[in-house]
Structures are given as C-alpha cells and as structure tokens.
Image (tube, rainbow, N blue to C red):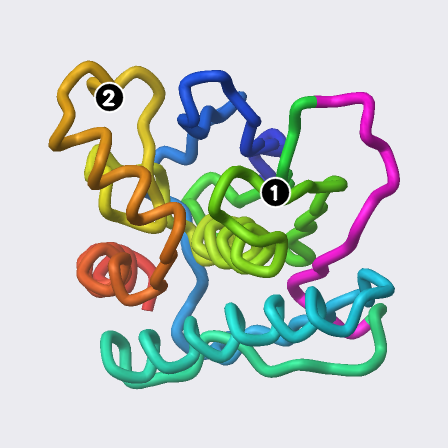
Amino acid sequence: MRRPLLAIALLLAATLAHASDIELTGAEGHPRERFPLTIHLASSGEPSLDAAGRRAVADWNGVAETALGVRAFTEVAVRDTAQVLIGFTSDDATRLMGLTQISAETRGVIMPPVRVTVFPMQARGQTPREVLLYQIVAHELGHALGLEHTRDPRSLMCCVTGSIDFNDPVVREAYIAARRQPEVRTAAAQLAEHYARFWKRVP
C-alpha cells in the first residue's frame, strides 16, 4: 500500500530558518539493494549552477560510501530511467527555495521517483547563488534519502520548525556559518544512524 505523497518544502523565511510543510517521520528509506539510486539532473541553464548541483551529488556519494559502504547516487542521462529527478522551475511567485515530493509504502520504503524542484534564487547577503544552489540540492537529496530535519543548527538537514533560538547569538552564528559553507558531511552521522535502523526492518 502506498502512503500519501509527502511534499517537503524549503521556505525563504525572514528568520533565515528553513521550514517544512510536511515532515518525514524518520521511518522512510531505500532498501540496500537499490543503491546507488539513479538520478537525473536537469540543466538550470547556467553551467556554474549545474556544477554546484553535481558537487552536491558527488559529496553525498562520498559521505554514503564512508557511512554506508555504498554510493548514494549514479547519474543517468535519460530522465525516464531515474529514481530521483532534480528539476528547475521559473515560478518565482512563492517563498519556496526547494521542494521534495516523496511517497512511500506502509513499511516506509520510498517509492521512486522522488521529485526535487528548485525555485528561482538570488544571492543572499554573503552567500553566492552557487553556494545557495548547492545547499538546496544537497538538503533536498538528504530528504530523497529519507532523512528528516534535525535540531542541530550546524547540520545540512537543519532545521525542525521552531527548534532554533535565533536570540541565542551562538546558535544564530552556527546556523549562519553552516548556511554560508554548507557541508554534506555534517549529515554523515544522521545518515549512518538512519540506515542502521531502517535496514534492520527492511534489508
């Protein structure tokens, strides 16, 4: 039985925080035999942004090989054969930065394809567009792997809505630093723990 579609959205908020319309439960994932997931990256029309997206994929592969012993993704040229689809939209009448659409079986097995949509973006303060694109794609790929939001302001998968106290200067600075220099490795422990649990239930 297929569970309802989850739409997990990154929002551009005045607080700088990311929010989600619907949260993953932490029970969703992919069977080991499915890895590496086939992925198709549509072109943004800008080579520098496309390169940033591919760096996000490559960095997830490096983290997954260390944490899980398998690569996370392998890129395919034919869109219809991909289990994960990354696309771009010209719709700028929204505060969304990225949107991941996922459906899963009742056991939590994610049903391909997972669809990631990236919305138009502008450089934010000291964060160039290429860094912002990397952050968005890398974060959404975390969701595509089944990772939920965390409460750690330093993590790529931050944040659970309302969990960050931006009045705390230490927390705020950690959050801003992580957005300016996003790193997939900050989600390595979360990935390892997530699949240690998931593969006990669904090998």
Residue position marked by numbered label 1 in the rendering: 100
Residue at the front extreme of this rendering: 126
**Residue 134 percent across, percent down from the top left:** 54, 60
Q: Quadrant of residue 6?
A: top right
Compute the Cα span from label 1 to label 2.
Answer: 21 Å
Q: Is residue 25 above or below residue 60?
A: above
Q: Nearer the viewer, residue 160 or 146?
A: 160
To which residue does mark 2 refer?
A: 163
Residue drawn at x 44%, y 54% is 142
For the C terminus, give its image quadrant. bottom left
Span shown in magenta: 81-94
Compared to residue 64, the image places residue 150 above or below, namely: above
**Residues packed near mark 1 inside 10 Å, few (<14), some (14 to 19) or many (20 plus):** many
In this rendering, is residue 157 above or below 34?
above
Corner quadrant of residue 167: top left
Q: Is residue 95 left or right of residue 199?
A: right
As drawn, the label of residue 45 is none
Q: Quadrant of residue 168?
A: top left
Is the Cβ of the residue at disc 1 closer than 8 Å to that at disc 2? no
Query: Which residue appears at 50% of the width and 48% of the height?
Result: 127
Picture quarter with the N terminus: top right
Amino acid type, residue under disc 2 in the picture: Ser
Q: Nearer the viewer, mark 1 or mark 2?
A: 2
For the point 43% across and 79% down, which residue is it? 61
